Amino acid sequence: MIDPVAASVTRLEAVRAGIARAAADCGRKAREITLVAVSKTYEAADILPVIGAGQRVFGENRVQEAMQKWPALRAEFPDIGLQLIGPLQSNKALDAVRFFDRIESLDRPKLAAALADAVQKAGRQPGLLVQVNTGSEAQKAGILPQDADAFLAVCRRDFGLQIDGLMCIPPVDQPPSPHFALLAKIATRNGLSTLSMGMSADYAAAIQCGATHVRVGSAIFGTR
Ligand SMILES: *Cc1c(COP(=O)(O)O)cnc(C)c1O
């Protein structure tokens, strides 16, 4: 009989090995790359074995879902880091600032203003990444590549936000590496060191292009 619990841990180990291989292949060290396990749609019972195997950084794409399932797990494992990787509505900015260790989906001035406000109220600033819509897709969140420099300046100067880096989700129907390279280029010219890019299907390519964080869901937890 197949034990689904063991399956997620086996898959986690395969992803760790894949990260190490991709890093070695381009002369990087595996410890320069943080694996963010994307646990959206999965419940505590599915997440626990992965925590048990030593995974500590998790990504969620909905504020509400994360606030329901993580407090109990966090009480048990206080060293867990939680990252919001999905779109954030301005009216949930304060919840997100209080709850997450990092928000990766800052992508518009209105949200920057709401986050700045929330940071004042909460007395803490989580790590912040600006999401860039590298493929300029109409349906996708993220600041357009040509607007990224100006937006970063606005976040820093007008809103006093400290920005750690950039995040992108390349178009599904294109080779991802040019998008990863573009994100790396925008980060370099803005003095940013954190690059959140690469998912289950393309994290190795992202590591080749300089990813510091890869967001891997289905390759660990199974298909959603
Ligand atoms: C769901 C999601 C992921 C993980 O995707 P997989 O293909 O399951 O690895 C990564 N990043 C974001 C923003 C996501 O929403």
Image (cartoon, rainbow, N blue to C red):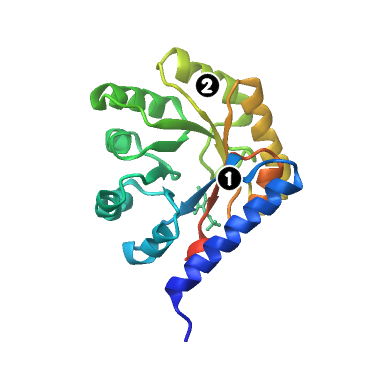
Residue 201 visible in rendering: no
Q: Which residue is mark 1?
A: 169
Query: Where residue 154 appears, x then y in whole percent?
Result: 48, 17
Is disc 2's CB within 8 Å of ligand 1? no
Secondary structure of the residue carrying tag 1 is loop
Residue 211, image x, y percentages? 62, 40
Residue at position x 62%, y 27% in the image: 187
**Residue 44 or residue 176, whichever sits in front:** 44
Amino acid type at image mark 1: Ile
Q: Quadrant of residue 148?
A: top right
Q: Is mark 1 within 8 Å of ligand 1?
A: yes
Residue 86, image x and y in percent? 44, 45
In depth, the one of 107 and 98 nearer the eye is 98
Query: Does residue 166 appear to the left or right of 181 in the view shown?
Result: left
Q: Which residue is mark 2?
A: 152
Foreground residue, 34 or 133?
Answer: 34
Mark 1: few/some/many CA within 10 Å (<14, 14-19, 20+) = many
x and y percentages locating residue 126 in the rendered image? 37, 31
Determine whether 31 is above or below 14 in the image.
above
Q: Secondary structure at mark 2?
A: helix
